[in-house]
Amino acid sequence: TEGIFQKLNEIAPTRQLKGLAEAKKSEALVAAEWPKEIDSLREPDAEKQIEIIQAAIRTVRDIRSNRNIPPKEMLVVSAKSQQKTVDILNQNAELIHQLAGVKEFKAGTAIVKPANAAVAIADATEVYVHDAIDPQAERQRLEKQKQQIEEAKKAVEARLANENFVTRAKPEVVARARDRLAELSEQLKTVEKHLSELNG
């Protein structure tokens, strides 16, 4: 057999179909350059919409988990936010139904928190899961959330009070910190409002 292959090499030193170009040896995948992001293909608005929908779904799931609501129990959920966010949520209500186990969902700019509804804040959106709370347990949860927001707010305030940070950090970093402070201030107002409602 070895002799046959030696003769074959003499007769046909290269073995490929006539007329076909020789295959080029490509670079190994593990050594190939990492793909570069193409900015022209990004859609910031679409990305933001997905973030809003994901935040709402995650918030409903968190409320379900924290209150030991059975996974198969279908929930009634409402949400209050600014008009742009409300439109996104209502247009994608079917996704929220399917992925959060919700049978009824409605978002609006003037939604009122239902009695005994569990509430959580997803970015700038208040999410209500109807008939889900024990008032005493909800009061304790909101007190804890208030404390966490206050601590985060103090940390951002201290950062912005640092002249070195404000003058030396990139403008966009300082702007993000200021936006974060405004967001935390709004969250704190919302939590305090719900605590006031629970306390009568």
Image (cartoon, helix red, strand yellow):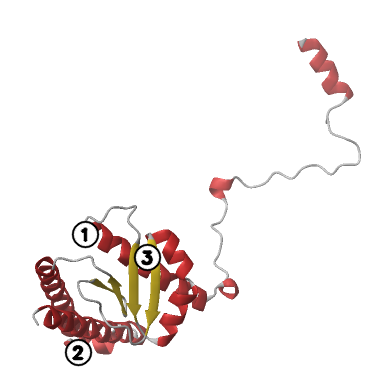
First in sequence: mark 1 or mark 2? 1
Q: Residue 66 got which mark?
A: 1
Name the secondary structure under disc 2: helix
Question: Which picture quadrant has residue 160?
Answer: bottom left
- 127 with respect to 149 (left or right): right
Residue 92 percent across, percent down from the top left: 48, 71
Q: Residue at x 50, y 77 (%)?
A: 44
Location of residue 136 with respect to 69 vertically, above or below: below
Question: Which picture quadrant has residue 105?
Answer: bottom left
Location of residue 98 with respect to 123 vertically, above or below: above
First in sequence: mark 3 or mark 2? 3
Q: Residue at x 11, y 65 (%)?
A: 137
Location of residue 85 with respect to 7 vertically, above or below: below
Would you name the residue on which mark 3 appears? Answer: 57
Q: Are marks 1 and 2 in contact (CB under 8 Å)?
A: no
First in sequence: mark 3 or mark 1? 3
Q: Residue 163 got which mark?
A: 2
Q: Residue at x 78, y 9 (%)?
A: 1
The front one of 161 and 200 is 200
Residue 36 percent across, percent down from the top left: 55, 64
- 49 with respect to 82 (left or right): right
